[in-house]
Amino acid sequence: MLLNEIIREKGKTPDKLLSVLIEYQKTKNRNYLTNEDLKEVAQKMGLPESRVYSVATFYSLLSTKPRGKYVIQLCRDVPCYVNGAFDVREELETALQITMGETTKDGLFSLEYASCLGCCEQAPVIRIDQKVYGNLNRKKLAEIISDYRRL
Amino acid sequence: MNRIEKKLLTKRFGIIDPMSIEDYLSLGGYAALQKALKTTPHAVVEEIKASGLRGRGGAAFPVGQKMEAVQKAKSGVKYIICNADEGEPGNFKDRYLMENDPHQIIEGMAISAYAVGAAKGYVFIRGEYSRSVYVMDNAIKAAKEKGFLGKNILGSGMDFDIEIYTGAGSYVCGEEFALMLCIEGNPARSTFKPPFPTAEGLYGKPTQINNVESFANLPHVIQDGAQEFAKIGTKHSKGTKLVSLCGNVREKGLYEVPFGVRLWEIIEELGRGVQGSIRMVQVGGASGPVLPPNMLGIKLDYKDFADNGMSLGSGAVIVIDTANEVLDIVRNTLEFFRHESCGKCTPCREGIVHLLIILDRFMLGEAEKKDLELLKTLIQAIEDTSICGLGQAAPTALKTAMRYFPEVFAAGIKKRSAKAI
């Protein structure tokens, strides 16, 4: 039902495939699309399953494996790296009791690396749920995490 | 304003509300489009050519020449694409342009559309730039309401519409063919050139694809005239350049300077230097060269960079202090490319992995002397045989590090092996 609405709004042509997948993923609590979801998209858009799968597995904002409700993306490229990105990683891993690439047991947070988020003037930065947080330090990180826990 | 700054593209930043088209109009917005519509498409292209404006995305191809090719291409359907897939580490200029003065970009695209005869345009914005998508979407809607986009623009008989296309996390989408494949609903795996996009671009149709900053320059060229525009900058590089200044400098941020300014002026006068000492500076982003402190007298100028065997890239200046080691930075850069390689062609997919394996031997102090030759051969092969710019540029940091910091590599060679040779 939901997918039908998304396709009706976005359109059915192949150029809308990526935005349909992104919107569909947004409706999922665990931030990913199952093989069944992808088959459903293929069928409703009249595209081969292989094409839908290849697009869904190519782009890093899409996932075919379960993730947390909030995906925390950490940039580790040079501008963030020289401004302490790995200290941020340590803080995050300690605070959430998981390592990069994992999801917390309660399904609330995932930790991922992201390629440059284009906010190098605020390095080091993380991005959660479309929002970028920069000029991070220990206190700021703790506040951000506890804010999301309370949501 | 600082002595070396020159505000052209950023002159309205902070003065206008980016969500208000009235603000843009009150400061002369869309006057360049109206001026262009009163002349012929041919005259517009000639004006851009005369300005000497070159593409700001990194390849520095003359914008007017590209427009002329699309204009002359025989096709009933043509496209304009604004490449806003800014993902080069160290760059944030396109985000600032979109979020602070969106109409300047839209006006530039509309001028292009008139010149080349395109009725449809796309702004391809990376998926991570949620705010940019929001501001640009609002601006496009407002421009349509006011008749600067849509059917019969300002009564000229010209139709032009812009659609936003959002990426989904892939650096290689910034490469023009990969970007167009993405719009067509495919994984972004680039392809061989030629044909170039000007002949066979989006859906096989002639396409003018340019960077955000390139389009943002067009209203100024048309409004001020090519002659006036070409007064800014140097003999070989006309206009201003947006510089994303970051890394370990005190005052990180976006600055606009005329071409010809020296790197140390940008770092010391605008960035107010670093706290300790500078180890090196990476120019243009991950795909750019790394320079030692004694080379910072180099000018921000296409020719000055070319004379030194490098390219200027998209204008990022990443300053790295002595708390960081050369090989760590090179390794970080190569890791980035390893992750972002689309995997289509072997030199890029496998070559970068092997560069990392060999580099690790230097970092552990276990390299053999022949590993230096091995690195050079492999770098050459990756540069020569990768399909797209991503692969071709991936070894640049390593290559320039070997050129300017040979002592660091020498220190990574096993003592016994060094003696034996």
Image (tube, rainbow, N blue to C red):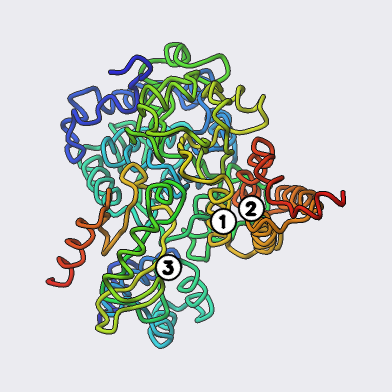
Measured as percent of width and height from the top left, residue B256 is found at 37, 26
Write the residue at 48% across / 71% down: A55
Residue holding disc 2: B391
Residue holding disc 3: A13
- Relative placement, left or right, of B324 versus A83 is right
Residue holding disc 1: B337
Q: The N terminus of chain B is located in which quarter?
A: top left
Helix, strand or loop status at disc 1? helix
Task: Say if labels 1 and 3 share a chain.
Answer: no
Helix, strand or loop status at disc 2? helix
Write the residue at 53% across / 18% down: B50
Near mark 3 (Cα within 10 A), the count class, few <14, some 14-19 or many ≥20, is: few
Gap in angstroms between the C-alphas marked 1 and 2: 8 Å
- Front one among B359 and B299: B359
Q: Chain of mark 2?
A: B
Amino acid carrying mark 2 in the image: Gly
Amino acid carrying mark 3 in the image: Thr
- Front one among B107 and B247: B247
Amino acid carrying mark 1 in the image: Phe
Task: Say if labels 2 and 3 share a chain.
Answer: no
**Residue ranking furthest to the bottom:** A36
Q: Depth-wise, is mark 2 or mark 3 nearer the camera? A: 2
Q: Is residue B87 visible?
A: yes
Gap in angstroms between the C-alphas marked 2 and 3: 31 Å
Q: Are marks 1 and 2 in contact (CB under 8 Å)?
A: yes
- Relative placement, left or right, of B10 versus B206 is left
Helix, strand or loop status at disc 3? loop
**Residue ranking furthest to the left:** A150
- Front one among B28 and B150: B28
